[in-house]
Amino acid sequence: MPQPGPRPCPLCGSLRKRPIAAYARHHLARCTGCGLVHTALVPTTDELQSYYGGYPVHAEVSPITLKRYDELLDRFEGWRTTGRILDVGCGAGHFLQRAALRGWTAHGTEYGGQALAASRAKGIAVIEGPLDPSNYPTGHFDVVCSFEVIEHVPHPAEDLERMVSVLRPGGLLYLTTPNFRCTGRWLSGPDWSVVNYPEHLNYFTPATFKALARRQGLRTAWLRTTGMDLARIRTKAGMDRTARSQVRAGQEEFRERLEGSPALNAAKRMLNGLLTLLGIGDHMKAGFVKRP
C-alpha cells in the first residue's frame, strides 16, 4: 500500500523535480528529466480511504454519453477478433453494458461495493480490486480500455504494464485522462479543479502520455485533445461534491442544446480539430496498439 514520503517520477523514476508554486498545496512538481507533472508525495492509505470512501457512483448516464459510447465502439470494431473487451476501473458498468449489447464479451475491474453491485446487476463479469493479469490468459483481450483512471494511480507505468500483458498482440489500448497542457487550466489558474490531492496523482500532456505508452512498447494510433470543459472551468478547487454536481447538471443541459443543433455540432468538430492540432484540449483520448 502507498506510504508517505518523497515520490520518484512515475514515468522515468527520477527524484529530480521542481515544485509548481501555483499548486503547492497539492504537492505538484515537474520532473526535470522527462517533464511529467505529478505529486511529489505518495498519499497514505488513510488519506486514500478517507477520500474515496465517499466517492460517487453514477447510477445513470445521459443519452448523449451513450451515443459517444456507441461512436467509440464503432471505432473499436477494427480490432475485434475474439470479441473480448476489458474496462479497467469500469465504474457502474455503463460502457461495458453498451459493449455487451453489441456482442462483445465484457469484463471489468473496479473497487467499492456500490460500483461492483451496479456492474454485476448489468451482467458484467467484474473482479474487485486492481487489474491482476493472473486472472486472465496472456493476450486475452482485443481491446483494453480505461476511462479517467491513469491519473489516479500511484504507479501508472506498472498499471499500464498489466494492461498490456492481457492485451493480444495487435490489440488496442484506449485511455483517457485530463490534459495538463489544456486551455481550461490556463483559464482557471490555481483554481483548476482537476488538480486535487489525493484524488489525482499524475498530470499528463500529449508528450508525456505518448512517452508512457512508448516505454511499454506501444504504438500511438491516435491521440486527440478535445473540448473546453466549461464545468471544469466553473468548478473551483475545494468545492464540495454537491456543488460540483450542480455544475455538472448545467453542463449536461448545454450538451443537450449543442447536440440538437447541426450548426453548433459542425462548429464543435472544427474546434476539436484545432484543439487537437495545438494539443490544448481539456480531454486526452488516445488509442495505443500493442506491437505484434
Image: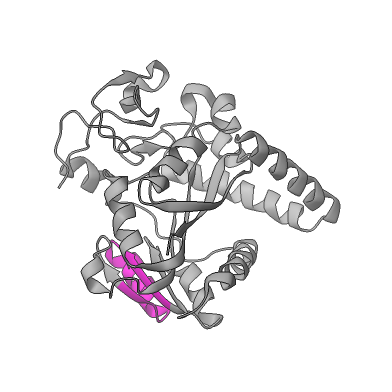
For this orientation, the residue located farthest to the front is 292
Closest to the observer, 258 or 2 = 2
Q: Magenta stretch containing residue 113, yes or no?
A: yes
Q: How many marks?
A: 0
Q: What segment is highlighted magenta in the picture? A: 106-126
- Residue 266 placement, left or right of 20: right
**Residue 76 sits above or below residue 83 on the image:** above
Quadrant in the picture for the C terminus: bottom left
Identify the residue at horizontal 32%, vertical 69% (top origin).
116
Closest to the observer, 72 or 172 = 172
Q: Quadrant of residue 134?
A: bottom left
Coloration mode: one colour
Residue 182: give x, y in percent of width and height: 56, 33
Residue 205 visible to an observer of this rendering = no
Identify the residue at horizontal 30%, vertical 21% (top origin).
17
Q: Quadrant of residue 137?
A: bottom left
Identify the residue at horizontal 43%, vertical 44% (top origin).
241
Q: Quadrant of residue 167?
A: bottom left
Residue 230 visible to an observer of this rendering = yes
- Residue 99 placement, left or right of 262: left
For this orientation, the residue located farthest to the right is 263
Closest to the observer, 276 or 64 = 276
Residue 195: give x, y in percent of width and height: 42, 33
**Residue 54 sits above or below residue 105 on the image:** above
Residue 204: give x, y in percent of width and height: 44, 37
Residue 2: give x, y in percent of width and height: 17, 43
Q: Magenta stretch containing residue 89, yes or no?
A: no
